Amino acid sequence: MNTRQTVLVNGLSKHRAASARVTHGSRVLFVREPANSNDENAIAVLDCSTNERIGFVAKHHAKMIAPYLDSGLFDISDQGARIQRIHNLY
């Protein structure tokens, strides 16, 4: 079973201090924010080591992932995910 998935994280520039500490191999949490006024499918991305928000899963990815997180069939919030690649932070 392939467990790798690439997801774009937006909003890094709004959370510069926290996102600057995230490097290759850093663990992150995906946390659903269904009450977010900007996106009902919002998924915040938090740095596991500090619990600080570093950004949000891009809307087009969040729209696909949110139903799975909500259903409980797909849960990466407990284990966390690992950063594999960082491109153009700002």
Image: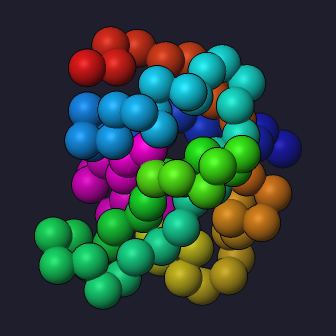
Q: 89 or 70, which is in the foreground?
A: 89
Q: Is residue 88 above or below residue 60?
A: above
The N terminus, quarter of image: top right
Query: Which color scheme is applied?
Result: rainbow
Q: Quadrant of residue 81?
A: top right
Q: 65 or 11, which is in the foreground?
A: 11
The C terminus, quarter of image: top left
Instruction: Specify whether residue 83 is in view.
Output: yes
Residues shaded magenta: 54-65
Q: Name which residue lies at 55% across and 27% down.
A: 21
Q: 81 or 53, which is in the foreground?
A: 53
Q: 24 or 16, which is in the foreground?
A: 16
Q: Quadrant of residue 82?
A: top right
Percent position of residue 17, x then y: 41, 33
Percent position of residue 85, x then y: 56, 18
Could you tell whether 17 is left or right of 82 in the image?
A: left
